């Protein structure tokens, strides 16, 4: 019997996705629930599994194609050619086959064994790991400092401002409840920004120290790929046996909205504002927009979030997203969900935005002092000579790679935001380590089923593994365990009781399939869940692990106990 494999429902109001990677090829034998394709929606990867064991038919779309929900991707001939049933549980990609050997010229003909283009988290980690493995390594970086977007204008400076703004908000709103009375609290934004700069400098200097320690050569300039084994750095030729592209990503543009990094800013400009805007509009309800919107809200701005979809943080577990939206609204963030921005007009007073309902309807305007454009990021793959040299890109400008990060050009590899998958610094780091080990003949690999994601608002949102919606779509029977921070002693002592922990486990095997946390310290606690999933733990394993008391992490244990409806403290 021939069974169609279709694009599943991907969440409320998500109508299309892009085929990031085919995990199986026509004619391959597959087991029931074995992933056959990876779909990309915004910053989330979704695996499409075979509904039954059998042999795959033709692929009706290519990698990089955009497909609609419900579209037929391929077929499976049920029961064909010896494919066997597998239990319905979380799956892990099959172990990679050995990478094809590239016959290079003699080693002495190259300037370096490994040349990495880009010194962000993926690039600098790959360079250091390759040096540890004995390679002669160079890393090309066009910035004046190492660390890429993450350390310079992304992850690190934003977390510095998040922490400072949380401290300010606590001093003005929360400390009185602890019996700490502070009169005349004032905001020194210049000092706050200076501290942010000090944090950034310490981190980028740290990477520079690590390069020196591991004897990684820093080539300062702009790299252009010329072919196998050949690049130019600001026009100067450099050769390497292996070339790794880790060029990262850039902020996505929006037609009708012209960025000047002063009144219409990306995340880069939002980290450098010299005054607190009276009114800030954030275009995009994803991670970056909500984090930076939260910073300026706590410092006194009136913040409105305009999101194309009718929900925040697409791809997050639906129950978590709804609770998240309620909490942010309670904190005073305005929401215009299910709306799109069609025009941004600069005026003497600021910016006037024209917005319309996504589903159609009457347009309206929003006036503000500053607009933060944060609708996602795109691969930084242009103007590097990639296509001219023979490196294939997909429809979204991402570099096409195989299971070993190899591109279509022999001897050239790519990792991080510039390839398919979630645009996360830690995902890029793991890929950098895995690739360095593959080049050294080792068995480097990345478990993409156990990549955590965190939104560093207050409260934090952290997630790893499958969502409840994806499990339902895949037809996987599962159990749910939940525990609220309101019932956690440490959370009560801290006065931070918003949120809960949610654990999804396979109904038959009890293996943990996904963990979702909204609450204090969620970004730290998700590491325990990720470790549990990496080692194939059951909810019973987590429940029987002794957790220190009183800690926030006890909520994870109680949620695991609740999978079998035997939580103690609720």
Image (spheres, helix red, strand yellow):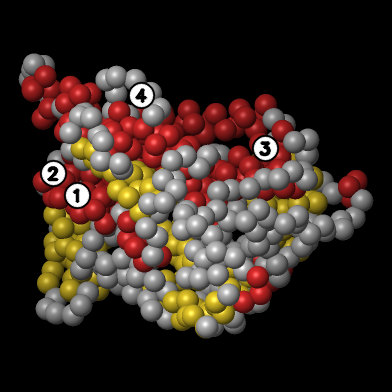
Identify residue for label 4: 547
Left-right relation of 532 to 141: left
User: Looking at the picture, how far across and down is residue 167, in whole percent?
Assistant: 23, 28
Decide which of tag 1 and tag 4 comes sooner along the chain. 1
Q: Which mark is residue 323?
A: 1
User: Looking at the picture, how far across and down is residue 434, in whole percent?
Assistant: 65, 45
Q: Nearer the viewer, mark 4 or mark 2?
A: 4
Q: What element carries label 1?
A: helix
Q: Residue 412 carries which label?
A: none
Residue at 46%, 58% (x, y): give it: 88
Identify residue for label 3: 129
Q: Where 456 falls versus 132 (above or below)?
A: below
Decide which of tag 1 and tag 3 comes sooner along the chain. 3
In whole angstroms, how far apart are the C-alphas of marks 3 and 2?
A: 43 Å
Q: Where 411 falls versus 54 (above or below)?
A: above
In whole angstroms, how far apart are the C-alphas of marks 4 and 2?
A: 31 Å
Q: Nearer the viewer, residue 461 or 561?
A: 561
Q: Nearer the viewer, mark 1 or mark 4?
A: 4
Residue 20 in view, yes or no: no
């Amino acid at each position: 019997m021939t069974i169609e494999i279709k694009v599943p429902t991907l969440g409320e109001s998500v109508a299309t996705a892009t085929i990031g990677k085919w995990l199986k090829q026509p004619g391959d034998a597959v087991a029931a629930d074995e992933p056959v394709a990876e779909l990309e929606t915004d910053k989330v990867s979704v695996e499409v599994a075979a509904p039954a064991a059998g042999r795959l038919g033709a692929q009706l779309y290519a990698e990089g194609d955009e497909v609609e929900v419900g579209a037929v991707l391929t077929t499976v001939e049920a029961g064909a050619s010896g494919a066997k049933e597998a239990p319905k549980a979380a799956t892990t990609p099959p172990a990679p086959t050995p990478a094809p050997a590239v016959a290079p010229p003699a080693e002495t003909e190259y300037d370096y064994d490994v040349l990495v283009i880009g010194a962000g988290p993926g690039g600098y980690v790959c360079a250091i790991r390759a040096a540890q493995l004995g390679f002669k390594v160079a890393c090309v970086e066009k910035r004046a400092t190492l660390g890429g977007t993450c350390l310079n204008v992304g992850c690190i400076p934003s977390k510095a401002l998040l922490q400072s703004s949380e401290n300010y908000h606590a001093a003005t709103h929360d400390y009185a409840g602890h019996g700490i009375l502070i009169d005349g609290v004032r905001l020194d934004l210049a000092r706050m920004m200076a501290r942010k700069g000090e944090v950034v400098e310490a981190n980028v200097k740290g990477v520079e120290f690590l390069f020196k320690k591991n004897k990684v050569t820093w080539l300062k300039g702009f790299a252009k790929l010329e072919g196998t084994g050949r690049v130019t750095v600001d026009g100067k030729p450099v050769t390497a046996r292996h070339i790794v592209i880790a060029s990262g990503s850039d902020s996505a543009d929006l037609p009708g909205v012209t960025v000047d990094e002063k009144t219409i800013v990306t995340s880069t400009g939002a980290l450098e504002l010299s005054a607190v805007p009276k009114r800030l509009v954030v275009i995009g309800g994803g991670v970056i927009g909500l984090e930076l919107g939260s910073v300026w809200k706590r410092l006194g701005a009136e913040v409105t979030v305009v999101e194309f979809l009718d929900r925040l943080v697409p791809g997050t577990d639906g129950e978590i997203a709804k609770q998240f939206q309620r909490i942010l609204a309670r904190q005073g963030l305005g929401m215009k969900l299910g709306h799109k921005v069609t025009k941004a007009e600069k005026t003497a007073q600021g910016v006037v935005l024209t917005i319309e309902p996504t589903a159609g309807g009457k347009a309206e305007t929003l006036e503000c002092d500053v607009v933060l454009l944060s609708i996602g990021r795109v691969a930084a793959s242009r103007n590097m000579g990639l296509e001219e040299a023979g490196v294939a890109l997909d429809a979204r400008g991402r570099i096409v790679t195989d299971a070993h990060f190899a591109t279509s050009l022999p001897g050239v590899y790519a990792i991080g935001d510039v390839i398919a998958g979630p645009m996360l610094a830690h995902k890029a780091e793991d890929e950098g380590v895995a690739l360095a080990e593959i080049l050294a003949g080792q068995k480097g690999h990345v478990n993409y089923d156990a990549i955590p994601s965190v939104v560093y608002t207050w409260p934090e949102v952290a997630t790893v593994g499958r969502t409840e919606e994806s499990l339902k779509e895949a037809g996987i029977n599962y159990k749910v365990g939940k525990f609220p921070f309101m019932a956690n002693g440490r959370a009560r002592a801290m006065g931070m009781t918003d949120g809960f922990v949610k654990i999804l486990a396979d109904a038959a095997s009890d293996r943990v399939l996904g963990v979702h946390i909204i609450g204090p310290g969620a970004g730290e606690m998700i590491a325990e869940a990720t470790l549990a999933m990496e080692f194939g733990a059951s909810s019973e394993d987590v429940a029987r692990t002794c957790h220190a008391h009183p800690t926030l992490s006890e909520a994870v244990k109680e949620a695991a106990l609740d999978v079998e409806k035997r939580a103690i403290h609720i």
